[in-house]
């Protein structure tokens, strides 16, 4: 990946990340699952698709599950339940992104990724994303990411900044999903392992046509 040098860059910059990003974003509130628990977590409101959604332009749960299992390989123990949760909350996506991320953190950190947007009727499009994160992870790691895309009317709409939805995180079996929104669009990044832990507290992500170091 062209931006694999991020690992070295982040290790040099870890001490300055907190001061630079501390005032720019608010982390999403993570829940263990979508049901009430002993910790009092409440089920988040569903993100339903518009009523004129056409099944022929969207992906079924079998199509997304198949693509996800092929993409994640052995790291997919909880993938089926995470995808089921995402479909029950947001419906059928009309696009999805498969890609890889690299990120690092020292309380606060950065995340960079690149992948390909797949649609049924508008082809494939290269996508890059970047944004700040905050949490308890240290060091720099990489991970695979699958992002479900909802209500996409034009591929160019993906190139925007999306903020996290409070209380939208759902984790099970080492796989997790969070929801991001911008106007009528909803994105659901699915991560596993280290990417899951670091991604749990991403404040927002900016999606671009070309790679950039600027996360704002």
Image (cartoon, rainbow, N blue to C red):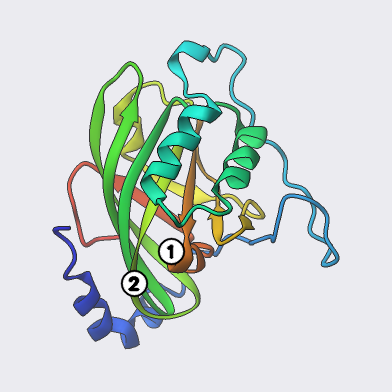
Between 62 and 158, the one nearer to me in the picture: 62
Q: Residue sitting at 83 percent across and 60 percent down?
A: 37
Name the foreground residue: 182 vs 76: 76
Picture layout, residue 35 above or below residue 213? above
Q: What secondary structure is found at the residue carrying circle 2?
A: strand
Residue 85, numbered circle: none
Mark 2 and mark 1 residues within 8 Å of each other at the beta carbon: yes
Q: Residue furthest left?
A: 2
Q: Earlier in the sequence, mark 2 or mark 1?
A: 2
Q: Taking 16 as reference, is 142 above or below it?
A: above
Question: Where residue 131 sits in the image (x, y, percent)?
Answer: 36, 60
Q: Position of residue 163 (x, y in %)?
A: 49, 50
Left or right, 2 with reference to 143: left
Residue at 52% from the left image edge and 24% from the top image edge: 60
Q: Residues within 10 Å of mark 2 (few under 14, many from 20)?
A: some
The residue that appears at 47% across and 33% down in the rendered structure is 64
Q: Quadrant of the C terminus?
A: bottom left
Q: What whole-number distance in Å separates the C-alpha atoms at marks 2 and 1? A: 8 Å
Q: Residue furthest bottom?
A: 15
The image quadrant that residue 49 belongs to is top right
Question: Of the numbered discs in the image, which one, if any, rests on residue 141?
Answer: 2
Horizontal and vertical percent position of residue 206:
35, 50
The answer to whether any part of residue 147 appears in the image is: no
Q: Is residue 106 visible?
A: yes
- Relative placement, left or right, of 37 versus 182 is right
Quarter of the image for residue 119 reads top left
| Label 1 crowd bin: few (<14), some (14–19), many (20+), radius 10 Å | many
- Which numbered tag is attached to residue 195? 1
Residue 197 higher or lower than 86, as above or below: below
Question: Which quadrant does the N terminus fall into?
Answer: bottom left
């Amino acid at each position: 990946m062209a931006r694999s040098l991020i690992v070295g860059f982040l290790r040099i910059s870890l001490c300055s990340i907190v001061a630079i990003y501390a005032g720019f974003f608010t982390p999403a509130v993570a829940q263990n699952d979508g049901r009430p628990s002993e910790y009092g977590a409440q089920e988040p409101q569903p993100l339903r698709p518009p009523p004129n959604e056409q099944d022929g332009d969207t992906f079924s749960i079998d199509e997304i599950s198949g693509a996800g299992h092929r993409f994640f390989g052995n790291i997919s123990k909880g993938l089926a339940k995470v995808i089921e949760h995402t479909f029950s909350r947001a419906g059928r996506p009309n696009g999805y992104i498969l890609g890889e991320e690299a990120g690092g953190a020292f309380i606060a950190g950065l995340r960079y990724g690149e992948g390909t947007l797949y649609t049924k009727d508008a082809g494939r499009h290269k996508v890059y994303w970047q944004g700040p994160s905050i949490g308890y992870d240290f060091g720099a790691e990489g991970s695979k990411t699958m992002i479900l895309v909802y209500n996409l009317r034009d591929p160019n709409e993906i190139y925007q900044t999306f903020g996290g939805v409070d209380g939208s995180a759902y984790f099970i079996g080492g796989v997790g999903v969070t929801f991001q929104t911008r106007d009528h669009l909803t994105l659901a990044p699915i991560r596993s392992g280290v990417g899951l832990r670091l991604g749990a507290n991403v404040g927002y992500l900016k999606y671009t046509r070309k790679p950039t170091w600027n996360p704002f």
